[in-house]
Image (tube, grey):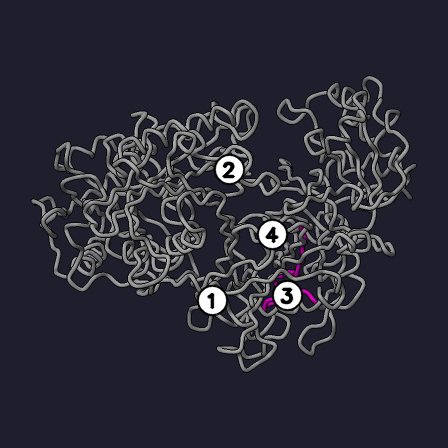
Amino acid sequence: MLITLAYRVRRQDLGALLGTITAYPLTEEFKAAWESLPKREGQRRPRYSALATGLVAATGRPVKLFGEHELAEEEQRTGSRMLLLTSDSAFDHRLRVAVRAWERHIRDGKGTAALAGLLPDPEQARPFADFVTFRTGEVPVMPGWVFRTAEWQVMRQLAAAPFRMDGRPPVVLSMDTDGALLAWDPDDLIVNRAGTAFSLQKVTARLTTRAGIEDPVLCFDAHLSRISPQGDWAKNVWIDRDQEDAPILRLPLRHRKDKDADEWRSYFDPAIAKILEACQLAALEFPDKLPDVPGAIRPQMARSRFHALGSGPGPRFMMRLHEHIVRILPALVPLSYEADKRIRLAPRVTKYAPDGLPPAAVGPSGFERVTLACVYSTAKGRERMLAELAELTGHLVNPEPGGPATSVNARLDVIARYCPGLLDHDTVNRAAFLKSLDLPPGEDDLVAAWLETEYHPDAPRPERDAKPHLRRLLAHLGIPTQFLATEPAVLPPKTDPPSPETKKHAARAALRDLLRAAGILDDRLLEAVASGGRPNGLTRKVLLVGIHARRQQTGEEGTPLVLTMVALYVDPDDLANCRMLVHSDRRKAWAPGAGGVADFHAGAIGTTRFGRTGEKAELTRAVVEARLADLLAAQPGGTPMAVFVDTLETRTIWPGLQNTRLGEGPLPGDTLRDQGADVAVIRLNTDISEIGRPVTRREKANMPSDPKKPAAPERKVYRLREGGRHCWLFAGRSASIKAKGGDRGALYTRWTLPAGLTSQLTVPWHSYTGKEIVVVRPGSWAPEQLASLTASLCEQAISWDDRTQMPVPLHIATVIDEDHPDYRVSGEET
């Protein structure tokens, strides 16, 4: 049995576990007053979180403000349009004073502050259970705000008892105003040997649902939060105001440039100062200088910057957390997963075929012939490219620079081009160098470019990065690209060049990514999904479709939705007959993979026509239905289709993917199914905070000799025993934790690491991870067949040596987006 950090909350235990909530149902008048607030910060009205943050600072308690879309239908019917929630009503007077002071600040002293006068009396504290509707055979229904506040009482209970940790003094957990638990005591900070870098352990909880489970589910997780001693690269800060029984404040942190001192200063929202003054509370200011060792004020490092401590608490910590949860909250029932013996995975193949890449591997590209163009600027770069190509092909590959192509097999050639001007970061007009490449033409032939670029993670980033420009430039010519990094001639001080092993791995990954972009597949994929004597293997021709959707945040009113679709036509008996297809917006049709990739990278990323909700979601669904119909029409009659979707990215587009309406609302392929087509739908969820992180397994065989060491998930697919839905967990370990010495986090916690191993504090400690597989519509398949197919398409990656988060077609659709020159250029994704 597999143990995870996911627990069933039985309905009879809801009151004791989740406690009560104090609500202020805000009416249409309050909403209208809110809409009248002046626009600020880029011509936007203040966000609900802006007021909630001020109220947290004033009351020292968790406070949340929700809009209409988060309310239950009953709440909306009774006239509520917004909802202000607190953990108790003891601070009602202070809350009203704080609301008035905040609004005056927002209005800059102009006009009348109306919000406080429109606050109703708080409702009498009510149990969370009052807001949960239970349904036979289905998940419970709750308003959106319940999912974001129900953990408050649970975390208080967990914090009330010391956290036992492998013979060292127990850890005291302190709750913050976001509902997280922190190992706050100075002795519990994780510190590097030099005493200059600090992290603290953080535990989070999230109320959710699980397909087929009739009760709510609580999922826990733990993280290592890095502390920025002086506030650099910090967006939030924790503050202990030394008030008994009060949570630790977690507030946003702002930054501005002090022109006189030519330094960046950190500060709080000015509204907080006004609120605290009005409430006659002590001022809250961010000091110009913090102590070298974190004390009462601890800024949380937000950006992915260099840090002398590694990330992650490790699997052993997760096992101790599970033990703490079941000891303090015995009413929580761990969800049970058992290995599904009907599903057996093929051995993963990581090595190149000894006799080289077969000509049939070019067949899935849809082109008669493919030429790989190695474009380099240094002799070492060329040597690395050709050495990796020799391993791929099984023989020496040595095309002359600027000379004719060298044939690898009957359908694959290689050319070499020396062109440092094209590759240099400082080149302004790269188009002028394209003709010198002398690339082979031909409508039925494809050129895929492997380009050397200068890069080192510790070196300053170039002002004009060549990679996005080159990818877009060559995409206009229909050429997919991949890059090979070489370090600068002069490295920054105290920076080591990459090791030969690192360089070898980078070249291998880059070449395989190039083959993936070109649509070249080898036998490994077919061997992974075909039956090969295993139950539930693939025995018929099938279309496998991945649908990827992501919001591209621009900071403007319109938020484009990026939609990519990839299809694999798989013939388990003939590699050359397989096809990789990508839908091209430019052609308004399905195109051979490389052509669709190039079309996508040549154009703008996303469109505001599509969206996840309302009319835009309807349009998105209609467009996808038309694309699926075009795809199926081009295949032999009766070809079954399996559609893979990412739960988080698509469940508002297709409500039938949501647990509350699973299989009953709109789904991809509805139109085709209505016409008699065989279309299955499988959803994937990789959000550990929603599905519960694997902790250990309880079996008789292959168990560690140390009973306190977590047993890693085996190479199996685990089925959820409870509920009537077809739900599996594909648990596993990362490549890092499987590497030599990578399991330190299973042997020790960061608090109990022996003195001789303190250097291991600098490396990441990965915990076990997993993905949830839910068969929403099985079509003509047995559900376990689809679960087996999905796991196999994750287990055998086509462009690297380990497992991928998503099955092949969905993984490719995601990578195409991530490779776009404008990926997240305009802002961060949400």
- Residue denoted by label 2: 650
> Alpha-carbon distance for marks 4 and 3?
23 Å
Mark 3: amino acid: Ile
Viewer-closest of 417 and 395: 395
Tell me which numbered mark, 2 or 4, is placed earlier along the sequence. Answer: 2
- Residue denoted by label 3: 190
Residue lying farthest to the left in this orientation: 404
- Residue denoted by label 1: 737
Q: Is residue 514 visible?
A: no
Dot 3: few (<14), some (14–19), or many (≥20) neighbours within 10 Å?
Answer: many
Q: Which residues are magenta?
A: 188-206
Q: Are marks 2 and 4 in contact (CB under 8 Å)?
A: no
Where residue 615 appears, x then y in whole percent?
A: 54, 22
> Alpha-carbon distance for marks 1 and 2?
31 Å
- Residue denoted by label 4: 689
Viewer-closest of 354 and 125: 125
Who's the residue at 48% across and 58% down the image?
730
Who's the residue at 40% across and 58% down the image?
803
Tell me which numbered mark, 1 or 2, is placed earlier along the sequence. Answer: 2
Q: Nearer the viewer, mark 1 or mark 2?
A: 2
Tell me which numbered mark, 4 or 3, is placed earlier along the sequence. Answer: 3
Where residue 285 appears, x then y in whole percent?
A: 77, 44
Viewer-closest of 224 and 807: 807
> Alpha-carbon distance for marks 4 and 1?
20 Å
Q: Nearer the viewer, mark 4 or mark 1?
A: 4
